[in-house]
Image (spheres, rainbow, N blue to C red):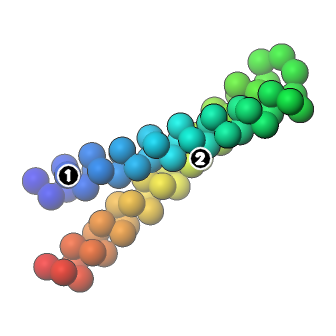
């Protein structure tokens, strides 16, 4: 039960971080890049942000569970 809750919470944090990274980078790349490239580069940034924040959220969640068990 705990692992499911941890994964759902980490997915939420990762999705929010990925969406924010996408919108911020897309707005910036739109001014500097042409064609379909702003979308691709922004999507890459969103994926990296999602993975990073997902992993950090899972690690912090597991650490807090073990500390306050």
Q: Secondary structure at mark 1?
A: helix
Residue at x 52% of width, y 55% of height: 52
- Marker count (numbered): 2
Give the distance between the C-alpha atoms of the residues marked 2 and 1, in whole angstroms. Answer: 22 Å
Which type of secondary structure does the marked residue at label 2 adopt? helix
**Disc 2 target residue:** 48
Identify the residue shown where x is 19% and y is 49%.
Answer: 4
Residue 64 visible from this viewpoint? yes
Position in image of residue 32 (x %, y %): 89, 32
Closer to the chain start, of discs 2 and 1, is: 1
Instruction: Classify residue 43 as left or right of residue 61.
Output: right
Query: Which residue is label 1 attached to?
Result: 5
- What residue sits 28% from the left and 69% below the top? 62
Residue 1 located left or right of residue 5: left
Q: In x, y percent, where is residue 24?
A: 67, 40
Can you give x and y, in whole percent of width and height, for residue 22 in the image? Answer: 62, 36
**Residue 33, quarter of picture:** top right
């Amino acid at each position: 039960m705990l692992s499911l809750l941890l994964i759902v919470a980490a997915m939420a944090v990762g999705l929010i971080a990925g969406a924010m990274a996408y919108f911020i980078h897309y707005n910036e790349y739109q001014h500097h890049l042409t064609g379909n490239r702003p979308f691709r580069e922004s999507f890459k940034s969103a994926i990296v942000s999602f993975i990073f924040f997902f992993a950090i959220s899972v690690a912090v969640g597991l650490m807090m569970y073990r500390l306050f068990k």
